[in-house]
Image (spheres, grey):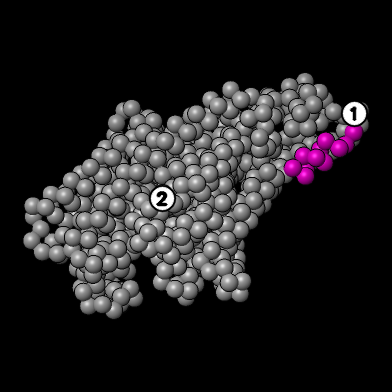
Amino acid sequence: MSGVFRASVTGGVLPHSRSSGRACCSSSSSSSYTTGACASSRGEAQPTSSGTSFERRRYSLLERERSKLLWSRLDSGTGSRRQSVVRRARNKVKSQDGVIVTRKKNQQNSKSSPGLIEDGGALSINDSIATIALPAFFALAADPIASLVDSAWIGRIDAISLTASGLAIAVLNIVVKLFNSPLLSVTTSVIAKAYVSPKRDLSRAASIAIELGLLGGAAQTILLFVGAPFLIHLMGVDSAQDPVLYHTAVSFLRIRALGTPANVLLLTTQGIFRGLGDTKRPFYATLGGNVLNVGLAPLLIFSFGQGADGAAWATVLCEYISALYLLYIVYENIPGFSVGSNILESKERFAGTAKQLLGTSSVLAFRSLCIVGTYAIASGWSLAAGEELSAAHQVCHQLWLGSTLLADALAVAAQTLLAQAITKEDADSVKEIIAKTCGVGLILGTVTALLIQLSNGVLPGLFSDDESVLAGINYLLPYVVWTQPITAVAFVLDGVLYGGSDFSFAAKVMFSSAVVATGAMTLGINFVAESDFDVLQSIWVGYTLLMTMRLFLILYRLQQKEAPYRKYLIEK
């Protein structure tokens, strides 16, 4: 009886807010008892007015570890009392960001959506993929668009300011790619598993991720602020030969360094929401911050006469606003979440969990280093073709990366849904998620390729009017077109590896692919190329090999017995 009762109560209701939790703690009477967060926080039963504690209590996957006290008391209660609680829990309906979650008898046998609800929810896997991927795409696209607008404002100052800001942003992008993006990916998988598992502490996982992000952000601020002169010098700017460019770039980098804690916090909270299957709130935060940045930057640049530094201050301020907004939402919606408590209460326990997160993040940092290094080598080799053709390569490279944003968003959905399905040991959902996300990725890549091909006569002219640059773009566009389906599916399969926590293999795949790609570039340029266009061809053959190897190595991994998700793919 108690097993049936528990399954009925825990299904399909989203978490309570902290306001409802405080209300639960405020009632008092002698006829019945409060349970869950309020009672367990005191370690004893608290009297309430009859029945009202159950009306205020919202059961969810996020609170399973806090519901043990409830089971023990209700198991010993009367049958009518049990039936009353079951009836209230089943009829409980919660709406969040347009997703309706309910438990009714006619839903108990329907197919669940691992990402948003459990055991008989209203969303299919198709709907869950769309619900996660679309907001994630808009969030991913918002930052590059805002950066372009920022560059347009800075470009109105002078060429030196634009160049200096570009150098500083390049340094920051390397830091984000190597250190912060891996933490985002690891946090997403950890939270996704904790969300659907009654054995994992969601609040503790989220708290440690935030604490680790804040510590990492503070460390990055110190290193970037103190090391700004050295880093700008590494970018090829000499303080003696070009002092104005040097000092402008150093000043811009130091101001942006002050926003590094907010940037890391923003990415970490995004990882938490991705793990919960909610990509709408990160999109709202990113969109709001970028809109504010677009309006604030010209005010500080021109009205207050801050120049390029004004754009940097605007970005820093907006990063803090967006990050604090998401942190507040996390605090309100995850019971037991707090910042600093894990470090203060148990330093050894925090150190153990933090070590695991950092260990996995370091593996992904190595993976990021491989891909960033490959792109850097390709940019260096492109200079051998001359400045005009090198510019054509950079244009096609940015177009190639920009066209993968939708695939990257689809990878987020694959990671979140797969991590939750594997944690619940739902073999049918695992197979369906992999098949559908890869299928959508293939369609997406094909459609993108067709759109780029159809716009071939117009697209190059949007980037340059130089005949040599246009010739180079026209020469490289076929490579951009035919690699789209391969690249899209490869991105999605990266999400599959992350969803299965197969981070080590993801790093091995990227390392192997990078070695082959850079080797092909080097051999082609040094031993095969006879013209400047042959140099570009060698580089893009390397890019094609990079993505093709990623695709086939991951497909091979899905067939290996030791793969963490292999047992779910075997037909019984």
Number of the label disc, if any, that sits on residue 31: 1
Tell me the kind of residue under disc 2. Answer: Leu
Residue 76 place in picture, x, y as percent: 77, 20
Q: Quadrant of residue 363?
A: top left
Res 448 seen here? no
**In this image, 86 relative to 446: left or right?**
right
Question: Residue reaching furthest front?
Answer: 240
Q: Residue at x 67, y 48 (%)?
A: 328
| Residue 145 position (above or below residue 524) | below
Looking at the rendering, the stretch of residues picked out in magenta corresponds to 18-28
The quarter in which the C terminus is drawn is top left
At mark 1, the secondary structure is loop
Q: Which residue is mark 2?
A: 231
* Viewer-proximal residue among 219 and 269: 219
Please tell me which residue is depicted at 47% across the width and 39% down the height of the picture.
186
Is the N terminus in the top left, top right, bottom left or bottom right quadrant? top right
How far is mark 2 from mark 1, CA to CA?
68 Å
In primary-sequence order, the first of circles 2 and 1 is 1
Say the numbered circle drawn on residue 455.
Answer: none
Q: Can you tell which quarter of the image residue 571 is in?
A: top left
